[in-house]
Image: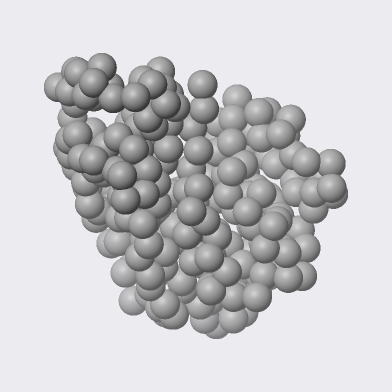
Amino acid sequence: MAISIDPAGRELRALGRVTRWRGLRVLEVGCGDGRLTLRLAQLGAAKIHAFDPDAGVVRAARTAIPARQARRIDYRVGHAERLPYRAHEFDCAVFAWAL
Amino acid sequence: MVHALREAHRVLRPGGLLVDLRPAAKHRRIGLGQGRRWRLVGVMRETFDEDHAANRAVARVVRDGLFQRQARAEFGLDRVMDRMEDFHRWLEEFGKRRTVAAHGWLIRRLERALVTRPRRVRIVARGPMTLQVLRRLG
C-alpha cells in the first residue's frame, strides 16, 4: 500500500519560489509525518524545528529522518499557541495546514 | 489561530517570512489514472468554514500591523494512491483536518470504476493548494 503526495513536485517548486532557503532557520508548525519537513531540508534550510500536537506522528517522523538530514531537523510535540523558543529566533515560519 | 500567528510573530526575526500553506477552498476531484489519462470519478463534498476562519485570522494580524502580505500563489497537487485501502486512509486523514460529508457514494463509485480498469490503475485525488507569504513587520 502506498500514497504518493505531489509526484510532479509542484509543491517543491512553489516553495522554492518563496525565498532562498539555503542557510535559513525554519520553524514548521503542524509538521505531521514530516513530509514537508524533508522538502524544506531538500531546499537547503540550515535548521528546521518542526512540531505537531500529535505525539504519534512526531514519533513516526523521527524514525523516518534520513541520516544525512538528522542534524538539521528537530521534531517536537507542541502547540502553535505556546512556542518554546526565544524571540526573533527564526528566519521563516511555515504553517503546514496548521491555521 | 490569531494566537498562533502572534506567537509566530514573536519568534520570527524582523523581516522574517511566514508561509501559510493549505489546501485551497475548492473541492478535491477524485479520479483514476495519472497525467493526461486521468478520468474523473467524483467530486468530494467539503465545507470550508476552517479556511474562512484562517483567512479571518490572517486578515486580523495584517490589520494589526504584525505582518504584511507579500505574495500568494495557487498550484495543483495530486495525491496518488495504489489501492482502495490507501484511499480510505487518505480520506480519514483528510477528514481530520477538513470537514467532509460522508463519502460512501464516492467509495462505491470508485469501486465500480476500478472493476473495469486495468489492475495497475492508480486512484488520484486532485485539488489546488494555496500558498500565502507574509512578511513580519516591527
Expressed as whole percent of the image width and height from the top left, the position of residue B97 reads 37, 37
Expressed as whole percent of the image width and height from the top left, the position of residue A9 reads 52, 56
Q: Is residue B77 visible?
A: yes
Residue drawn at (27%, 37%) of the image: B31
Looking at this view, is B107 or B68 the one in front? B107
Expressed as whole percent of the image width and height from the top left, the position of residue B66 reads 46, 75
Name the quadrant containing residue B45: top left
Q: Quadrant of the C terminus of chain B?
A: bottom right
Residue drawn at (63%, 49%) of the image: A37
Looking at this view, is B64 or B96 the one in front? B96
Residue drawn at (34%, 24%) of the image: B118
> Left or right of A75: which side holds A30?
left
> Left or right of A24: which side holds B36?
left
Expressed as whole percent of the image width and height from the top left, the position of residue B108 reads 19, 18
Name the quadrant containing residue A21: bottom right
Residue drawn at (74%, 39%) of the image: A65
